[in-house]
Amino acid sequence: MAEYKVVETFVSINGEGRKAGELAFFLRLKGCNLDCSYCDTKWANKGDASFEIMDENEIYGLIKKSGIRNVTITGGEPLFRKDMAILLELLDNDRELSVEIETNGSVDLKPYLPVCKNISFTMDYKLPTSRMEEQMCLGNFEILRNIDTVKFVSGSIKDLEKAEEIIQKYDLCKRTKVYISPVFGNIDPADIVEFMKERKMNKVRLQLQLHKFIWDPDKKGV
């Protein structure tokens, strides 16, 4: 059995992505290899952040007990830890579940493909505002599947221009779903819409984090 540092588990709606508005079981794991300027979960990655050690069977049991089909594994960076493939293989074999992993774009996804035949990746590409763009694993763009998603979190027009460049360079809209999301409080979503209109960004979707409009933006466990 493997051990995982679980910061929190909870049931809420998916605030973004393909299943936005649907109920999901959230599993947040501790630790991240990046330090994005706008990160809204820095508290979960601090050295003194509280966590519970759980093995894959305990986590799986919590998920099944919840009765929720959608599962979102997040962090931090879920794939930046030893033995993650053990948990993923267990979840991947349960066809009653619909599992997605939120990953920050810096971790090579290829080693996880054999245990993620049904699990989807929601992969960030870190834009200049994040100050983490140089950490991106560009090889991931070559192995993305139609069940996966690429997300760009934008805080400026410069970010939007970079997102457009990457989308075109890797022909992302023909291979997977692509979303642009604003850095909450940094850029007006209307400006993103205007940019999309000007650049004729067909098939790119604007997404807003629903949970930050329903609850206090800093509220945990939602």
Image: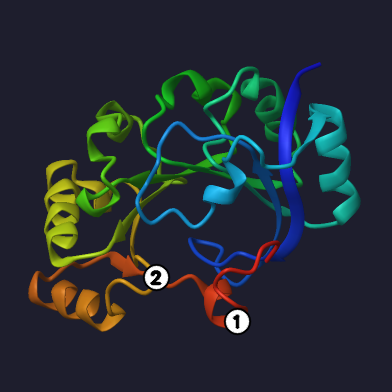
Q: Which residue is mark 1?
A: 214
Residue 161, compared with residue 219, is above or below; it is above
Q: Nearer the viewer, residue 203 or 186?
A: 186
What amino acid type should be assigned to the residue bearing mark 2?
Answer: Phe
Indicate left or right for 79 with 55 as reference: left
Residue type at the position of mark 1? Ile
Would you identify the image quadrant in which residue 60 lies?
Answer: top right
Whole-percent x, y for residue 94 in the image: 76, 37
Residue 221 visible? The answer is yes
Q: Residue at x 79, y 57 (%)?
A: 68
* Element assignment for label 2: loop
Q: Check disc 2 and report the residue beneath it.
A: 184
Q: Is residue 148 left or right of residue 220?
A: left
- Pick whichever of labels 2 and 1 is earlier in the sequence: 2
**Residue 74 visible in the displayed image:** no
Q: Is residue 169 left or right of residue 222?
A: left
Q: Quadrant of the C terminus?
A: bottom right
Residue drawn at (17%, 46%), measured in percent from left and top? Answer: 166
